[in-house]
Amino acid sequence: MSKAFFEAYYQTYNREDPDALRAFYDPDVELHSAQGVIRGVEAVLEVYRGITAQFSDHMTPLDIRERSDHTQVRILDSFTAKVDVAEFMGRAFAPGEQFSLNLLAEYRLRDGRILRADIAAL
């Protein structure tokens, strides 16, 4: 899939609009991360809603590389707490506290939508 697809995906992700984000996911999407596997578009969007209820979550694609069967994206993921968060990734956050993660995502598509995303910290 083209670089433009992923640029549009991250722009949509950063708007915190799950209804708009839905268009980028295959109904059978799987998200693989250190937290395990999330299956199905509704489950993925529920996790997204949970994160964006607590944090402003801004993903910046630093490098997008198309491969023969997948696309690899290096991401800077910046979070700012919106509310008091008792526990997220092993720690508590007060409103306004920030942190960032360097991530590597590998995406596989089906019919122009994300079918599988493997996301890992760098």
Image (spheres, helix red, strand yellow):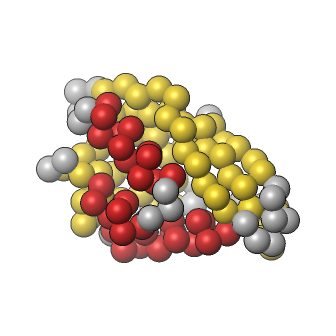
Q: How many labels does the image show?
A: 0
Q: Considering only vertical position in the picture, is 2 above or below 12?
A: above
Instruction: Give residue 50's position: percent from left, percent from top.
Output: 57, 72
**In the displayed image of the protein, which residue is found farthest to the left?**
111
Q: Can you give x and y, in whole percent of width and height, for residue 16 in the image?
A: 50, 62
Picture quarter containing residue 89?
A: bottom right
If the image is split into quadrants, where does the N terminus sit?
Answer: top left
Q: Which residue lies furthest to the front in this view?
A: 15
Question: In which quadrant will I find the C terminus?
Answer: top right
Q: Would residue 12 appear left or right of 110 to someone viewing this image? A: right
Which of the pair 89/23 is nearer the observer? Answer: 23
Residue 72, by quadrant, is: top left
Side of 56 relative to 114 (left or right): right
At 66% from the left and 46% from the top, the residue drawn is 78
Q: Nearer the viewer, residue 96 or 91?
A: 96
Residue shown at 38% from the left, 38% from the top: 7
Q: Is residue 113 above or below residue 6?
A: below
Q: Tell me if 79 is positioned left or right of 11 in this view.
A: right
Judge by depth and name the residue closer to the eye, 41 or 96: 96
Q: Where is residue 80 in the image (x, y as percent from the top left)?
A: 72, 55
- Picture coordinates of residue 82, whole percent (x, y): 73, 66
**Residue 70 appears in the rendering:** no
User: Quick check: 31 left or right of 97?
Assistant: left
Residue 8, relative to residue 45: is it above or below?
above
Residue drawn at x 36%, y 43% is 8
Any part of residue 8 in sight: yes
